[in-house]
Image (cartoon, rainbow, N blue to C red):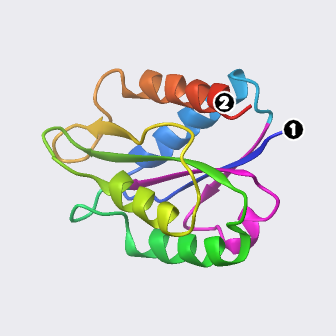
Amino acid sequence: MTKAIVFYDSRYGNTETVARAIMEGMKKGGIEDVLLASMKTADEEDFRGRDLWVIGSPTHWGSATFRLKTLLVNAMKDEGKDKRAAVFDTRYKGMSRGASGKISSLLETYGIPLVTEPMAFYVESGGSSLASGEAEKAQAYGAEIAGRSR
């Protein structure tokens, strides 16, 4: 049985909303044991025993947040062997790159393969809310992750 973690950082709540929708999609897709872990309260122990890591960050200067990258690197050093992952980010429409590219590169450095392509979720100008349809897209992405993880 797959045990997963959806680990995210969120500044305005949009990435958290996406993370929760992805978790719901994963559960509907058949992965029952999914831990939702916020950067604000998570530590390396949360990754222990989880074979599927779903990592998400808001895009900050074209990358993931510094604290998310730091905790992720520490977790990979301790728990990264034989893991699989998926990554996502939130960003404004029109941004050519986002946090998911940096997260993917970090995972690749530690030999953690992706089960599906990174996904971008868009926020309205000003970062106040997700663009229309993005929460539903996140649920579908979670179901896709579940389907590719069995």
Count of numbered circles in the view: 2
Name the residue at 27% across, 52% down.
98
Residue 80, numbered label: none
The residue wearing badge 2 is 146
Looking at the rendering, the stretch of residues picked out in magenta corresponds to: 33-57
The residue wearing badge 1 is 1
- Which x, y percent locates residue 55? 53, 53
Name the one closer to the observer, 50 or 25: 50
- Which x, y percent locates residue 51? 75, 52
What kind of element bears circle 1? loop
Instruction: Using the image, determine if residue 134 lies above or below residue 85.
Output: above
Tell me the crowding category of disc 1: few under 14, some 14 to 19, or many 20 or more residues within 10 angstroms, Cα based: few
- Separation of marks 2 and 1 at Cα, in angstroms: 11 Å
What kind of element bears circle 2? helix
The three-letter code of the residue at mark 2 reads Ala
Name the residue at 36% across, 63% down.
64
Residue at the far right: name it: 1
Instruction: Using the image, determine if residue 74 lies above or below residue 59.
Output: below
Name the one closer to the observer, 14 or 92: 92
- Which x, y percent locates residue 148? 63, 30
Name the residue at 53% across, 42% down.
19
- Quadrant (top left/top right/bottom left/bottom right) for the N terminus: top right
Instruction: Using the image, determine if residue 109 lies above or below residue 33.
Output: below
* Left or right relative to 133: residue 140: right
- Which x, y percent locates residue 105? 41, 62
- Quadrant (top left/top right/bottom left/bottom right) for the C terminus: top right
* Left or right relative to 65: residue 108: right
The three-letter code of the residue at mark 1 reads Met
* Left or right relative to 8: residue 52: right
For marks 2 and 1, the one nearer the N-term is: 1
